[in-house]
Image: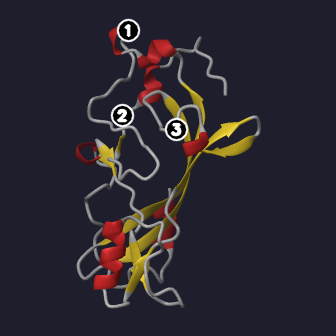
Amino acid sequence: MFENEVVKNTRFNKARHPRCTWQNGDQENMRRYVMTSRVFIPHKGPQSSARPSDHPWLQRAVQNSGGQYVVNPRKPAVYEWVDNSLLDLAESDRPQFDPGDIIWMSFTVGFNIGNEEWWPDVIPIEFIRVGRLPEHLIDDSHGGIYPNPEVTPLVPGLVFQPITREPACSTLSPETTITY
């Protein structure tokens, strides 16, 4: 949808490079979809060193950059929707995302034109647990969609694996009601 609008713009991709085939929606590329958020960004302001709260590896990388980079302060936020308000996931009764959780996600999309191809970048902003699938859809012994051994639960501070793009909703029956 986003791509269709962007390619209509006559100012986009004047060199007419083809779209990169990776993550283009073809069946062979639909198993996983990767989103990224930069760990480091170019140094443009007064902050020239890592913050004390940054991991020691990140602090060393910033020091070794000679002041050219800082740790990106805009890492994706993770929350749970509780009683009509956002709760930091780390403060939740379940401080990680688990298979079966219903996650609302906000993101930005950017489009890049390289020397030979163009491609979109999906950049996550927030992940919010808003509900949970019924247990009979989570328990694999009942033909549900999870657990999936290839999926790692998302925990605050963990670099996570991409989410599998399986057609999860196709297993829902018309009688199933999901409340959150």
Q: Residue furthest right?
A: 84
59 relative to 130 in the view: left or right = left
| Residue at figure coordinates x 29%, y 79% from the top left | 114
Q: SS class of the residue under badge 2?
A: loop
Q: Residue furthest front?
A: 52
Give the number of the mark in front: 1 or 3. Answer: 3
Q: Residues within 10 Å of mark 3 (few under 14, many from 20)?
A: some
Q: Residues within 10 Å of mark 2 (few under 14, many from 20)?
A: few
Distance Cα–Cα, label 1 vs label 2: 17 Å
Question: Residue 54 is drawn in which quadrant?
Answer: bottom left
Q: Which of the two residues, 122 or 170, is positioned nearer the viewer here?
A: 122
Q: Earlier in the sequence, mark 1 or mark 3?
A: 3
> The C terminus lies in which quarter of the figure?
top right
Distance Cα–Cα, label 2 vs label 3: 25 Å
Give the number of the mark in front: 2 or 3. Answer: 3
Q: Earlier in the sequence, mark 2 or mark 3?
A: 3
For residue 166, which numbered disc appears in the image?
2
| Residue at figure coordinates x 56%, y 26% from the top left | 132
Q: Earlier in the sequence, mark 1 or mark 2?
A: 1
Q: Residues within 10 Å of mark 1 (few under 14, many from 20)?
A: few
Q: Which of the two residues, 163 or 69, is positioned nearer the viewer here?
A: 69
For residue 142, which numbered disc appears in the image?
1
- Residue 6 in the image, given as x and y percentages of width and height: 49, 70
Q: Is residue 61 above or below residue 109?
A: below
| Residue at figure coordinates x 45%, y 32% from the top left | 98
**Amino acid type indicated by mark 1:** His
Q: SS class of the residue under badge 1?
A: helix
Q: Give the colouring mode of the picture.
A: secondary structure
Q: Which of the two residues, 167 or 38, is positioned nearer the viewer here?
A: 38
**Amino acid type indicated by mark 2:** Glu
- Mark 3 lies on residue: 95
